[in-house]
Image (tube, grey):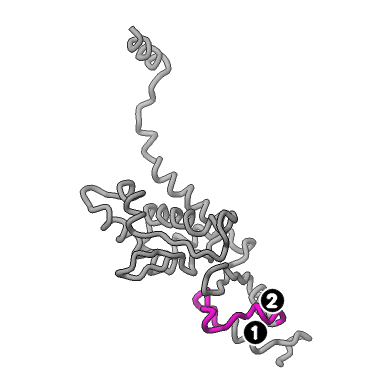
Amino acid sequence: MDQIEGIKINPEAQKLCSMFHYGWVSKKETGPIERDLKLFRDVQTYLSLMGYELLNPPGTEWYVIRLKKEYDSASFDYFLKKVKGIDRRHMALLTIIYANLVLPKELRHVDPETELSLTVDELVYNYGAKFQQGKQNPRKTIETLLAPLKKHHYILFEKGKAKITVGPAMYMLHSDLLMDICDYVIQGLTANLSAIPKIDEEETTESEEDGND
């Protein structure tokens, strides 16, 4: 083993760390490293030195690294700059998918090992009209919004197959970042409310009295 200032470097752990260049690695490539407790802890330690935490999301086929929260203060601004071509509608759909497929596991409403999924039909039925713009077909709208989420690995969605599951990039987001995204979406949805004329209480009272006559 190499030695740096008295620390013995585990070459196997070092090699595993180098495989996280996308932010995640398939367990098929690494094998179940948590079975070797020392190896797993070494990988955790090396990643921690670089400011990352190692995640093993239950029921998934990847190990994921996520920037530690103390170094992630500007994560939302970075998210907006990094993920091009995504607007409030994409982020609203992202939070819907998170709430349906990730949150139930985090809240222990279902077994963490359970694979949760959505279908395009379910999204269209429940949310298609809310995302629809003009006369665009609701299904086409949802499929168009899903495309960049798939491109950036927030979801897994094979063309011709109905099932949508969570992608590894979703686990790289802190839950409070998702809350920031929710706030950002809500701000966009309510931005035009200030343009609605305010109804005075006197007018409301008069209208109610007229209705009672």
Q: Compared with residue 137, is residue 60 higher up or lower down, i.e. above or below?
A: below
Q: Is residue 75 left or right of residue 122?
A: right
Residue ranking furthest to the bottom: 1
Q: Where is residue 177 in the image (x, y as percent from the top left)?
A: 53, 56
- Please report the residue visible at 57 percent of the width from the left and 83 percent of the height from the top: 31
Residue ranking furthest to the top: 213
Highlighted magenta segment, given as a residue range: 19-38
Q: Position of residue 159 (x, y in %)?
A: 31, 70
Please say if the residues under marks 2 and 1 sit with CB atoms less than 8 Å apart. yes
Q: Where is residue 4 in the image (x, y as percent from the top left)?
A: 73, 87
Q: Is residue 159 left or right of residue 104?
A: left
Which residue carries the number 1 mark?
13
- Quadrant in the picture for the C terminus: top left
Q: Which mark is residue 45?
A: 2
- Please report the residue visible at 49 percent of the width from the left and 54 percent of the height from the top: 99
Q: Is residue 130 left or right of residue 39?
A: left
Q: Compared with residue 95, is residue 5 higher up or lower down, i.e. above or below?
A: below
